[in-house]
């Protein structure tokens, strides 16, 4: 597993740690709908020091309109290179 000093564990990752050209995968906890949000979009709307793990409960599903989603920011944090 490749390791780089820039890789931040998910539980302490903040919006500022996400790669600007990347996407965060969001999965609806109700219907399982998967969406991707551009990091550049999150950076525009959220303070740089917001914790990524707290984003999920604030997000609303575009398909079923339920609030609360699972956030997968591993790719945006550079886990897959
Ligand atoms: Zn949904």
Image (spheres, rainbow, N blue to C red):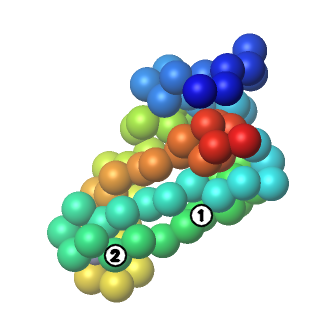
Name the residue located 80 percent from the left edge and 54 percent from the top edge: 21
* x then y, percent, for residue 44: 73, 53
Q: Which part of the image, by quadrant, shows the C terminus? A: top right
Residue underneath mark 2: 33
Name the residue located 19 percent from the left edge and 69 percent from the top edge: 30
| Of residues 79 and 51, the one drawn nearer to the viewer in this rendering | 79
Visible residue check, residue 39: yes
Q: Farthest residue in the right direction? A: 21
Q: Residues within 10 Å of mark 2 (few under 14, many from 20)?
A: some
| Of residues 5 and 69, the one drawn nearer to the viewer in this rendering | 5
Q: Does the closest atom of ligand 1 sit within 8 Å of the Cβ of label 2?
A: yes
Q: Does the closest atom of ligand 1 sit within 8 Å of the Cβ of label 1?
A: no
Q: Residues within 10 Å of mark 1 (few under 14, many from 20)?
A: few
Question: Could you say which disc has been placed on residue 37 in the image?
Answer: 1
* x then y, percent, for residue 65: 30, 78
Q: Is residue 66 left or right of residue 60?
A: left
Cα gap from disc 2 to disc 1, whole angstroms: 13 Å
Name the residue located 48 percent from the left edge and 29 percent from the top edge: 10
Visible residue check, residue 47: no
């Amino acid at each position: 597993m490749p390791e780089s000093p820039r890789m931040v564990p998910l539980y302490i990752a903040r919006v500022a740690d996400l790669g600007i050209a990347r996407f965060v995968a969001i999965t609806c906890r109700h219907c399982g709908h998967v969406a991707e949000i551009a990091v550049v979009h999150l950076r525009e709307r959220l303070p740089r020091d917001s914790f990524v793990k707290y984003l999920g409960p604030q997000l609303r599903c575009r398909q079923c309109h339920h609030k609360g989603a699972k956030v997968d920011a591993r790719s945006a944090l550079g886990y897959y290179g």
